[in-house]
Amino acid sequence: MKVANEILIPELARLLAEEKEVRFTPSGNSMRPFIEGNKDSVVLTPLTRAPRCGDILLVHAKQPGGQGIYVLHRLVRIEHDEQGELLVLQGDGNLQGEEKCRVADIIGRVRRIENPKGRAKLLTRGRIWHALLPFRGFLLKIYRHTMI
């Protein structure tokens, strides 16, 4: 059963605020190849430490024009501005485009990724994958044709 983000995410945030782990199945392909939308599930935990590059975070990011959007993306860098730390996220399956948010916008951090059979998938920091950004389009095309 698919539940709208406007209903699901606040409930996940409430449970995480109670220091509980939550599991859900994200949709979309922006985290491919590490998370397959509508197939893999993720286990989220509350953020108990400062976010680090490579963390996969569920956040309420601000879009240009001030609209907010919920995304489950990887933290690729931390910038600083007059208001403090600015977290920059990007989906592993995205070739361009980034989201920005503050630490206060983090809802949870991915602790585990599971395939549809419940087996843990490799949870990496994504450093090599991020370094391959210029070649990602080609690699993702190969992945789509061979793995799906």
Image: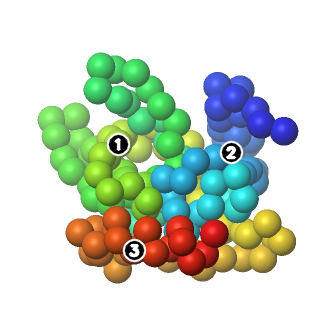
* Residue designated by label 3: 139
Query: Residue 45, relative to residue 105: is it above or below?
Result: below
Whole-number angstrom distance, CA of label 2 to CA of label 1: 22 Å
Q: Nearer the viewer, mark 3 or mark 1?
A: 3
Mark 2 closeness class: few <14, some 14–19, many ≥20 residues within 10 Å: some
Is residue 34 in view?
Answer: yes
Q: Nearer the viewer, mark 3 or mark 2?
A: 3
Badge 3 or badge 2: first in the primary sequence: 2
Mark 3 closeness class: few <14, some 14–19, many ≥20 residues within 10 Å: some
Residue type marked 1? Glu
Task: Identify the disc placed on residue 33.
Answer: none
Query: Residue 114, relative to residue 29: is it above or below?
Result: below
Label 3's element?
helix
Residue lying furthest left in this view? 82
Badge 3 or badge 1: first in the primary sequence: 1
In percent of width and height, residue 47 lies at 55, 53
At x 64%, y 25%, the residue is 6
Closest to the observer, 9 or 148: 148
Task: Identify the disc placed on residue 16.
Answer: 2
